[in-house]
Image (cartoon, helix red, strand yellow):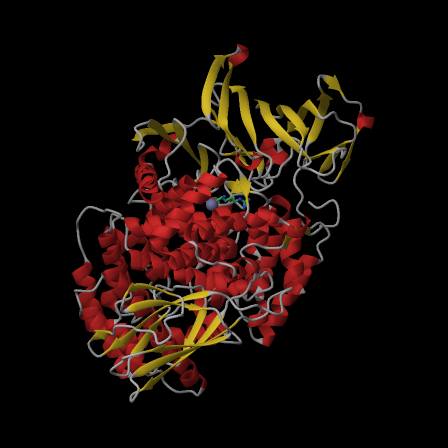
Amino acid sequence: MRDAQPCTIFLSDYRVPEFLIDSTTLKFELGETNSIVRSVLELRRNPESDSQDAPLQLHGTELELVSLSIDGRELAPSEWSQSGEQLSIAKVPAAFSLSCETRLRPQDNTSLEGLYKSSGMFCTQCEAEGFRKITYYLDRPDVMSVFTVEIVADQSRYPVLLSNGNLVATEILADGFHKTVWQDPFPKPAYLFALVAGKLSVVEDQFITSSGRGVDLKIYVEEKDLDKCDHAMLSLKNAMRWDEEVYGREYDLDIFNIVAVDDFNMGAMENKSLNIFNTSCVLAKPETTTDAGFQRVEGVVAHEYFHNWSGNRVTCRDWFQLSLKEGFTVFRDAEFSSDMGSPTVKRVEDVTLLRTAQFAEDAGPMAHPIRPDSFIEISNFYTVTVYEKGAEVVRMIHTLLGPELFRKGSDLYFERHDGQAVTCEDFVLAMEDASGIDLRQFRNWYSQAGTPRLEVSGSYDKRAQTYTLAVKQSCPPTPGQTEKAPFHIPLAVALIGDAGQLPLQLADAEINTESADNTELVLSVSQPEQQFVFNNIKEEPVPSLLRGFSAPVKLDFDYSRDQLLRLMRSDSDGFCRWDASQQLGLAEIKRAISALAAGQNVSPDAEYINACRELLADTSLDAAMVALMLQLPSEAYLAEIIHPVDVQGIHQAREALRKVLAQALKGELSACYSRCESDEAYAANAEQIARRSLKNTALAYLMLLEEEQFIALAIQQFESSANMTDRLAALTYIVNSESEYKAKALQRFYQQWQHEPLVINQWFQVQAMCRLAGTLETVQGLMSHPAFDIRNPNKVRALIGAFCGQNGVNFHREDGAGYRFLADQVLVLNRSNPQIASRLLVPLTKWRKYLPAAQQLMRAELQRVLAEPELSSDVYEVVSKSLQ
Ligand code: ARG
Ligand code: ZN
């Protein structure tokens, strides 16, 4: 809880640290009622600081201070003072050794930050500012130190004792205790510290690095989960190889450990050589894990591994630079996943996340640049903007430089800054220096929030044989930024003629472009208004714009239906092809909304239905792409496009349209379903994942018809599938139908999987996301189910998070009961786990985009939260900013 008025921290106030820590020794005595931490810090004044007589100020939160001494002399209470999170010692020598003893109660730490217990195991989460809950320290990423860590604990309860770096000693002590000592040779900030103690089983493997060193790979899990580690291990080895091949980065220690814990606020954490994972991001086997789950494990394992270079060897100077490591690492893991699976599908999925969650964030009250310039609580800035938009910004640099120069830039960045804590500016500068490409204007992406809009129009001059693209850019105001300078936007384009892409020749050769071949160009859009003229264009083309989603912008072009159909049928760029299908779907949904409002039937355009029919029949197409193109734009995406958002109206129109499509395409959908059925052994490869995705997309449509034969098909799939992807899909459709089998299916599923928490979370989620009326009551009922536990973030996300964030129609019930429910839960979680509470609150903060009646109800709930006297800084920041 907040004990002072929450204060805002500004990037512009950054000062180098007044002290440095040359070495850190930590001795942990882990106990059932108390845990003791004894630290010895070798401190000295930072020669680069301009205040050489400043007091020593250390961070510490919720700590019980037992003793404090300098160079062996214990300090009297009068020699130090405490205020808020700061401990000040006024008179200290230029260099000295500070010893400190603190007492903690990890078993009572429900915030899951600092040292805490999860399923009987001790573990830590220190990023961003959790280390200060362990001992007094300079808890900022630009203070880097080598660590030696000694852990003492009961050997029978905690046979495994881990920390960062190398194991240098083990010892059996009296009374059933034992001790291990770890040394990490790489200086690191405190946020990368980790400790684990528990009863853990291990899966082991080895990796030989490109220079021939052996690395021991270990994944520590509870014994019952030993059969769910293969996929993570394979993903880890693939990631290690990929980083050597694509970035020339080799692993730097002899051990790499991963530990799985049940209670974790985020996905995983890249602590040096001791990654700690949410079980949901490491465990996988076909019977319990969906295809999406397998892909998530692969992506997160790679992400955390890649941080060893982009984050650990080169880290952030301060937390405003978070995207330096997160944006870059997300870009790296996306490219890795793309190489391991289907590149277009990965791109479409990432763009979908960006265009829903990130665009919504950029348009909401918490909008911030990928490098924010102020914050109250840094935990609130682990956002889709910093991560996913940050990755798009790195991707644009990659596009502007091309792969070779980008690699030169990343080599220079790692070489120049190895062992340092640096800024986004240092990253851009390395890219500029290595490539010679001017990124001055490009830097606006780091400092300006909001989603730029590109308004593009095309005109063909038959006589001159030229085609002109006129591009206008703008960016809406965001909190604290009313005026925006123009961005430097890479706009990838092609012009499509009757027989395919036309060769491109720009009239103004001065214009800076990158050309993949001569039929695709990356236009450098940099002015508020600009024209690009293409010469020797012999027919009126259809422009294919923003190919590969070359920039995180909203693009408007007034396509005719025929042009979109042409792009959907034949664009060689997978993203644009898919996007054309979505624009057609969007137009049909808008028509359906008007039709329903006028009391008419929904009747989609025949050409659109035909195009869908062709997709279903064309077996030469990638099944995953067909599945994606057949899915109409999601309600979350529609809420970004149609203003004000009438949640019920959008839902009804979209569902009505889906039903009409299902009826019209019934034969093709059924044939497609049969074609995709297969009894081969499960593998999480692109080809099988594609087939399952198309099969389940077809089944989802067919289930809308509420016909006996299709319900029987779903029941059969539910009962006989051996993999969770197909079982869960069938369960989802059954739960959303009127079938009487519903209750039985849910009960059978629960019975079978009650001992697998990750599966039970999926069971909660399916029910929380049910579109039918009465779901709020179901969710409220499930809150007292014995398998639910509000202390476990995965369960909170599966039940409350899924209901409030992914079930628009029910969350936005017209009586406001959904809003009230969320505010109630936020107030409960505010006390136990502020990080989870403030994340959960996000759907309410978007109140301004809904109809007036909804706005009022949502705002009233936000005001009720704000009125709570003991708000955490996390919740306070989100709720107060959303009401401003
Ligand atoms: N660095 C971690 C990752 O992206 C996430 C840590 C999040 N911690 C937090 N307190 N929000 O891999
Ligand atoms: Zn990360």
Q: Residue furthest front?
A: 510
Q: In this view, does 413 lie above or below 633?
A: above
Q: Is residue 333 above or below residue 480?
A: above
* Quadrant including the N terminus: top right
* Quadrant including the C terminus: bottom right
Q: Which residue lies furthest to the right in this view?
A: 78
Observer-nearest of 734 and 819: 819
> Where does the image place residue 113, in percent across and percent down from the top left?
57, 39
Q: Which residue lies furthest to the top in this view?
A: 174
Q: Is residue 468 above or below residue 422?
A: below
Specify the quadrant of the image occupied by residue 573: bottom left
- Apparent side of residue 264 relative to residue 722 in the rendered image (left or right): right
Decide if residue 140 is in sight here. Answer: yes
> Where does the image place residue 515, in percent across and percent down from the top left?
32, 64
Observer-nearest of 300 and 23: 23
> Where does the image place residue 42, in percent across and percent down from the top left?
64, 24
Q: Residue at x 34, y 30 (%)?
A: 203
> Where does the image place residue 860, in percent across and percent down from the top left?
66, 66
Observer-nearest of 416 and 264: 416
Decide if residue 333 is in sight here. Answer: no
Specify the quadrant of the image occupied by residue 364: bottom right
Q: Which residue is drawn at 43% across and 76% down?
A: 556
Observer-nearest of 239 and 186: 186
Q: Which residue is drawn at 69% across and 52% down?
A: 8
Q: Which residue is drawn at 41% across and 43% down?
A: 411
Q: Is residue 746 above or below residue 277?
A: below
Q: Count of labels shown?
A: 0
